[in-house]
Image (cartoon, rainbow, N blue to C red):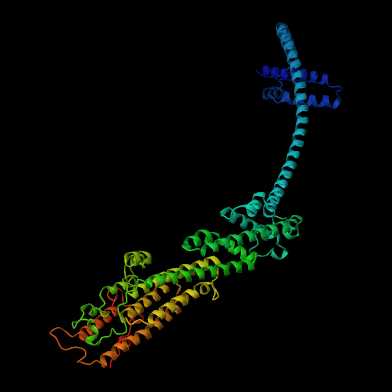
Amino acid sequence: MTLNAGRKASAGSNQTRSNKPSTASNSSNITPEDESERLSADLALFLSNPSLQSALADGSLDLASYSSTINSELATLERECIALHRQAAPDIRILRDEMDVCDSILAGLQEMLLGFQADLSGLSGDIRQLQEQSRSLAIKVDNRREAEEGLRLFLERVVVPPNLAEVICRGDVDELFLECVKDLEEKYAYVHLTDRDIDDAACPDPGFTASAGVPPAWTVAGKEMEEHLAKLRLRAISRTRTYFLDIMKELRRPKTHIRMIQTHALLKYGYLVDFLLVASPTIHGEIRDVYVESMSKTLHTLFRTYHKQLLTLDLRLATRVDLIAVEEAALRDAFSTKVNMRKRGDAFVLGDRAKVLDGAISAESGLDAAAAVVLIPPINAHVASMNGEKYPYEMIFRSIMSHLIDAATNEYVFARQFFKEYGQNDCFHAIFGKTLSLVLEQLENYLFNCHDAIAILLMIKLTHSYKRTVKARRIDKVLEPFLDRVTNLLWPRLKMVMDAHLRSIRSANAKKCGGGDIHPHLISRRYAEFTCSILLILNRGRKAGSNMDAGNDKLPSDKIMPRS
């Protein structure tokens, strides 16, 4: 066992030696130090076997015999190895040929890959160059886009398109013309911006971004376009003036639908009035004056004609002799001694005349105003004349006042929307001044010969309701003074008529007023009917409406019928 272990160690040592010389043969020179190190390594390997160490220790190992045995075994193994090598020589030769072929193939592949590597290195350089060019082009494109966007915005705000100039110079005044004037005014305001406008909150281009921080008025394009925009602006002013003057002529034509013209031909183009106010205050003042004059004449003519037509429908129910106490001879016919009963149906009975308050009372009671108007519409003079109808004067008064308040409301709202005047010097008073004076004059002339106390009292009641109407419509500032003047005309006349009735009662003679009868006396009947009519008028609408504003609506009875 020890011998075998020694043989194995010796074989390993010899194998190491056989390998090392082959390795050393490949080297150029072997130094003594290398030999010494190799011998030390062999001894260390030999002594690493425990069996050999024990055999050397007890002296049982014969190194001479052990060396010869090892040599014989090595010779045997060498012969076996040579025999095996000879047997495998053909396969080794084939393997060597295959390896040579593989080497040639791998050499070709190596050359090919080296070519690819050289080509790829060239392509990578081209790719890097293309990437750098791409980044440079991208930066240039972004810069050009930013410059194009800024230039586009600047040109849009400065350059006048051909179609815009064509519309302003030759097109009709319509919605397209209105939009073109708006664009023109924006361009005109933009090219006149200076460095003082840069911090203005209303500046259309804060910081002058579109013009690269330069005020548009300082740019070459801005200076060049100022003259063209100014000429085009003057043309727009001229055409706008012509358009409005033509519309004002239509307002003066008879039978013209004024509201339709105001809505579709004036208010629709209200921006043009604002444009004239900024671009040419003189032309704006001219348009305003022409409109005021046209509407003033038109309204004055309309109400004068309407009142004249309504006067032909007036049903006079009372004259200066229709008093409470009247002599019986005044009630007889000229050729008879009997009393004419038709003369007894006078103006002391209210009857259906209270219906004139239905619309006003319904509106005050919170009902639908449109439904209230339907109850008693204003008188259509042409239809009523054709039908031969007659109306007491309070109906005529109601028709005139209804039309007047509606027209005043429409004109007040229109003037504020159209001319943008909200101060004390707005054009409403200039438009309606003559018309209001005309209505007051007509009322005063009629009251001069009016002896119908019921009609006057009904007109006072209507005037109170109209005050509430104008307050609800928020035009009391302009119409309430007029209604106060109407009231100041009605109350004194009512006082005069009531004083005449009182004088007739005080100066009545029992013999001249007729004897007694089984029926109530005429004076008693007139007094009772007149008193009842007054009370009905005073209390009209109190049940239907609430008691709010009762103090303003109440007509003091002591002013109507003073006690003797």
Which residue does the image show at 75% across and 23% down from the upper left?
113
- 334 relative to 369 in the view: left or right: left
Q: Is residue 70 visible?
A: no
Q: 219 or 206: nearer the eye? A: 219
The N terminus: image quadrant: top right
Image: 193 above or below 88: below
Q: Residue 423: x, y in percent?
A: 54, 74
Give residue 180's quadrant in the image.
bottom right
Q: Is residue 224 visible?
A: yes
Q: 156 or 341: nearer the eye? A: 341
Which residue does the image show at 47% across and 70% down from the upper left?
301
| Outermost front residue | 335
Q: Residue 94: x, y in percent?
A: 72, 9
The C terminus: image quadrant: bottom left
Q: 515 or 422: nearer the eye? A: 515
Image: 497 above or below 463: below
Q: Residue 164: x, y in percent?
A: 64, 52
- 307 relative to 516 in the view: left or right: right
Which residue does the image show at 77% across and 24% down from the upper left?
115
| Outermost left residue | 518
- 105 relative to 204 in the view: left or right: right
Image: 550 above or below 74: below
- 555 relative to 440 in the view: left or right: left
